[in-house]
Image (cartoon, helix red, strand yellow):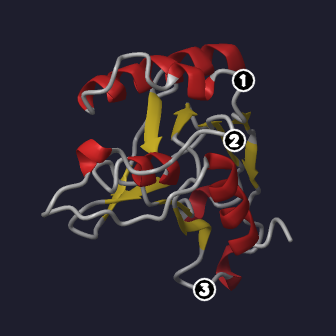
Amino acid sequence: IYQKLEENGKHLLRAIATYLELPIDYFDKHVHNGNSILRGIHYFPIENPEALPDDAVRAGAHEDINLITLLIGASADGLEVLTRSNEWLPIKAHHTDIVVNVGDMLQRLTNNKLRSTTHRVVNPPVELMKTSRFSVPFFLHPRSDMDLTSLPSTIDAEHPKVYSDMTAGEYLDERLREIGLKK
């Protein structure tokens, strides 16, 4: 599964490179032997739903750190993305679908031309709260030495440079410290 998702991710990055008017293979060397992760996530059943606060969710709103995330068939609904109009949109993915999220590293590289996907996982309806939810995201990370300096083509008078220059490894370390996973 890892190899197939990595292969699909590379194809998507080639399409993104084309959109950004970069050489089609721009991302190839950056993701070859990168730090990608395939992760199985188990959202446990909610055994005592009446004790939950009304605003409780299975996973709070967040963005992914990496370039792109590929999500394959979750076992249940619950994934929502935040739209540009600041509304939560449920994502109804079938078991044969792949949902793709832009991550923070791609947002930095494109100076916000491509925005990181804010998403969350909400609780199921009461009648399904005692069931588990499984999800298998593939976080496509570049090599640590990839330069995330915003592309010159994404910077102009209307879109000044937003981010400081750093490598993917430096950015990953910074974010992991921010969320308490690294000292």
Residue 144: numbered disc: 2
Query: Where residue 164 appears, x then y in whole percent?
Result: 48, 64
How many labels sit on residues?
Answer: 3
Q: Residue 52's image quarter?
A: bottom right
Query: Where residue 183 appears, x then y in whole percent?
Result: 86, 71
Tag 3 or tag 1, which sits nearer the N-term? 1
The crowd level at tag 3 (other Cα within 10 Å; few <14, some 14-19, many 20+) is: few
Kindly identify the amino acid type of the residue bearing the numbered disc 2.
Ser
Which mark's residue is nearer the viewer, 1 or 3?
Answer: 1
Cα distance, mark 1 to mark 3? Answer: 43 Å
Q: Residue 140's image quarter?
A: top right
Residue 175 lies, with reference to residue 72, above or below; the image says: below
Which type of secondary structure does the marked residue at label 2 adopt? loop
Relative to residue 153, is residue 180 drawn left or right?
right
* Quarter containing the N terminus: top right
Kindly identify the amino acid type of the residue bearing the numbered disc 1.
Asn
Query: Where residue 107 appears, x then y in whole percent?
Result: 41, 52
The crowd level at tag 2 (other Cα within 10 Å; few <14, some 14-19, many 20+) is: some
Tag 2 or tag 1, which sits nearer the N-term? 1
Disc 3 target residue: 53
Query: Where residue 165 appears, x then y in whole percent?
Result: 51, 58
Residue 33: numbered disc: 1
Relative to residue 80, is residue 147 drawn left or right?
right
The structure residue drawn at horizontal position 66% and vertical position 64%, both measured from the top left corner, is 175
